[in-house]
Structures are given as structure tokens and as C-alpha cells.
Amino acid sequence: MYQAIELFAGAGGLALGIEKAGFETIGLVEFDKDACATLRRNRPKWRVICDDIANISDLDLEDYFLINKGELDLLSGGTPCQSFSYAGKRLGLEDARGTLFYHYAVFLEKLQPKMFLFENVKGLLTHDKGKTYKIILDIFEETGYSIQNRIMNAWDYGVAQKRERLITIGIRKDLSKAIRYDFPKPHKYKPLLSDVLKDVPLSIGVHYGENKKKLFELVPAGGYWRDIDPVIAKAYMKSCWDMEGGRTGILRRMSLDEPSLTVLTSPSQKQTERCHPLEARPFTVRENARCQSFPDEWEFCGNTGSQYKQVGNAVPVNLAFEVAKKIHEALEEQSDEMETGFYFGREFHEAYPSIY
């Protein structure tokens, strides 16, 4: 079975999809204690490392994970992205020191997995006029990888939610002729809220205050502030009333005939409301988890706010599965080529003689 290590694992959406695709997860690094408790609750056999990534990346990773350099099949994860200075220096790994991304790159450099999966928000592509992402790609390439990427909408892959993510796939350069990665094709059917809000198990959740509840009772399914009396809407919106733009997130009520908007880390925010289609309340934790394609048996630990945050930060399970399934297929094709006589070039043998 192919083996994977995941960084910044959160509540396990990405790891669960990777497991479903056929990988054995041999280590997950996560800093948040509640997220670690969630991982351990659902997968007691997983090696969950609840620690600061900076403490782990400094270690001898081969000894720590009991795997030789070059043997790991997949490194996965997505870091919170920070700006970092690059002026006056040759762009490289040391220029990224002090950022969370740096530690992901260190894992690549030290373990040299065959492939990696790096996911992040769509906005990373244009952050700082594209400079941040370019630096990240340059460093990935310097650590020995060929890169391809795509913005993928979870709604195209069996998730009842509009959620765009930037997916970056890396293939170790010495394997680039043997491994070819093809991004998954979008599904023909795109699920709606009506598909996932049936018979949802009871779970914790928050409620609107009485005044806000009465306001949402005025908003039709699929509507927002423009669909109620403007006098009432203006009194609620206050200074937001004079802002430019459509402000379509204010007093927004979802409809069963549409997918969820991006699930957020907080159940109720004035600028980005997602009111339940049939009741005047926010979605529960379990309803949000359904929108993220988590199975109902996946339990979340921590208080109410922490559970909402874990679900909102997660990678949709079905999206992760589709991406990881293609990685699994690519690795299988590489294994087939090796069995039929494919051999690594001299440069790889000289770089990693201990493997042979």
C-alpha cells in the first residue's frame, strides 16, 4: 500500500479523502489540540503528532517517521500562507524561513517523496500580484520537483458546495518520465443542498438572536436583503447600506435548489450569512460537515466554536478523494513501468545510493 504523510492536517478532510483513495497514512502533523483529538477519535491507529511543525521539521525525519529518503509515496497538506521577504537574495529555501510554508518545503527536501499534494485557497494564486505563489513554486522546483496546478471547484466533484481550491501537484524530477498526473474530470451531476440536508443527525449548533431570527423569517429561500422591505433591511444593515457592491452575503438565505456557498469557520457573520433554507437559523456543525462531504460517523471534538472552525477549515473529503485517486493511479502506472524494466537514471542512483 502506498504511504502518505500529512502536514497541517486539521480535522482530517484531506487525509480522509487520501485514505479513501487507497493510501496508508503513517503520520499527521497538526498544532490544534481539538483537531488532533478529532483525528485520534476517528482513527485511533493513525500516528497523530500534536506539535508545532517547526519542532518536527528540525528533526531527522527519516528516523522520526521510520522511512528512508526517497521512499515516501506522498506528502500532502496545505499551509496558512504568509508573505515573506525575498528582496536582495537568491530565491531559495532559506528565504522562506519563518513562514509555515518553509516547513513544508523542508519536508520535501529531507524526505524527497515521489509526489506531493499542496492545497490552498484560490487567492494564493494572485497574492502579492502572484509573487508569493511564484516563490513557492520556485522553491518546490529547487527541492527537486516538476509542478502542475489547477483551480478546482469542489462542486464539480461530488460536494454540495461552491468551494474553489488551488491544487498543486508535484512529481519528483527523476520520476517525471515514469509518472504522469492527470487532474480528475468534473462529474456530470453536481449535488445540491437537497441532496445532503436529508435526515441529518442531530448535532450541536448555534442560533440567531430573536430579532435576527425574525428578519430571516422574512427572507425567502435563495434570497437576501434585497428581498425584504428596504426600510427593515436598512435598519439592520446600518453603515453597510451605503457600501458599494451587491452585498449579497448579507441576510443571505440558502435554497435547497442550490449548492452551499463556501462553508466558513463561523456559523454567523453579518457580511457572509448562510441561513438554513427551511428554518431561520445557521447550519449545525453536522449540516456543515455534510456540505464538506464528511461521513456522518466522523466525530468532531472540542467546543461548539472549535467544531465549526474545524469543519470550515477542512478540505472537502470528496474533492480530496478525487485528487488523491489520480495520484494513486499515477503511482501505480510508475510501478508497472518499473516491473517491465524501467530504471532510474544515473543522477538518481548517485543522489540516493542507500535506496538500492
Image: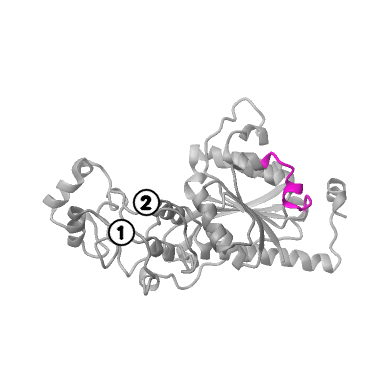
Does 325 sit above or below residue 345? below
Q: Is residue 11 left or right of residue 179?
A: left
Q: Farthest residue in the top direction?
A: 88
Tell me: 113 left or right of 324: right
Residue in view at x 84 percent, y 69 percent: 340
Q: Residue at 62% across / 33% down in the picture?
A: 97
Q: Report the side of 83 relative to 210 (left or right).
A: right
Residue beneath label 2, please?
A: 266
Residue matched to label 1: 282
The x and y percentages for residue 184 are 57, 65
How many C-alpha atoms fall within 10 Å of the one at disc 1: few (<14), some, or many (≥20)?
many
Q: Is residue 205 magenta?
A: no
> Bounds of the magenta span?
57-70
Please say whether residue 166 is visible from this viewpoint: no
Instruction: Report the number of discs.
Output: 2
User: Decide: marks 2, 1 in contact (CB < 8 A)?
Assistant: no
Please, what is the three-letter code of the amino acid marked with disc 2? Ser
Q: Quadrant of the N terminus?
A: bottom right
Q: Closer to the N terminus: mark 2 or mark 1?
A: 2
> Where 4 falls versus 79 (above or below)?
below
